[in-house]
Amino acid sequence: MTEDAIASFEEAKKLEPGNADISYNLGLVYLKVGNKAAALDAFKKVIEISPKSNAAASSMKYIENLLK
């Protein structure tokens, strides 16, 4: 099921590369499957796309925890 979610979010990201919510949710799924590097990349993308959003603030917290 999570593999399907990753594939869906990756496809959605190609269609809407500027959508921070897609990258945020992709990061969450990658965290769930234990792919910390991919999660980190996805959360960094959220901050790049929408630096002042709530998703960016949450992403920063995830990044801080991943880098500990």
Image: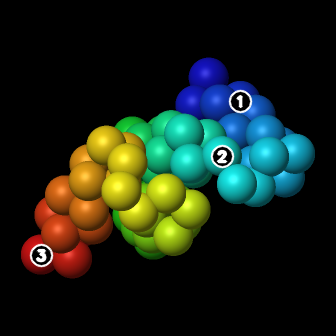
Which residue is outermost to the left? 68
Q: Residue 25 shows which numbered tag?
A: none
**Category of crowding for the residue at label 1, using alpha-carbon neighbours closer than 10 angstroms: few (below 14), some (14–19), many (at least 20):** few
What is the CA distance from the residue labelled 2 to the residue labelled 3? 28 Å
Q: Quadrant of residue 9?
A: top right
Q: Earlier in the sequence, mark 1 or mark 2?
A: 1
Residue under numbered circle 1: 4
Q: Position of residue 59 (x, y in %)?
A: 32, 55
Residue type at the position of mark 3: Lys
Residue under numbered circle 3: 68
Q: Residue at x 54, y 39 (%)?
A: 21
**Category of crowding for the residue at label 2, using alpha-carbon neighbours closer than 10 angstroms: few (below 14), some (14–19), many (at least 20):** some
Mark in the foreground, 2 or 3? 2
Residue under numbered circle 2: 19
Give the structural element (helix, strand or loop) at label 2. loop
Residue type at the position of mark 2: Asn
Q: Position of residue 32 (x, y in %)?
A: 39, 40
User: Viewer-proximal residue, 68 or 56?
Assistant: 56
Q: Residue at x 87, y 45 (%)?
A: 15
Q: Is residue 45 left or right of residue 64?
A: right
Give yes or no for contact between labels 1 and 3 (Cβ–Cβ under 8 Å). Answer: no
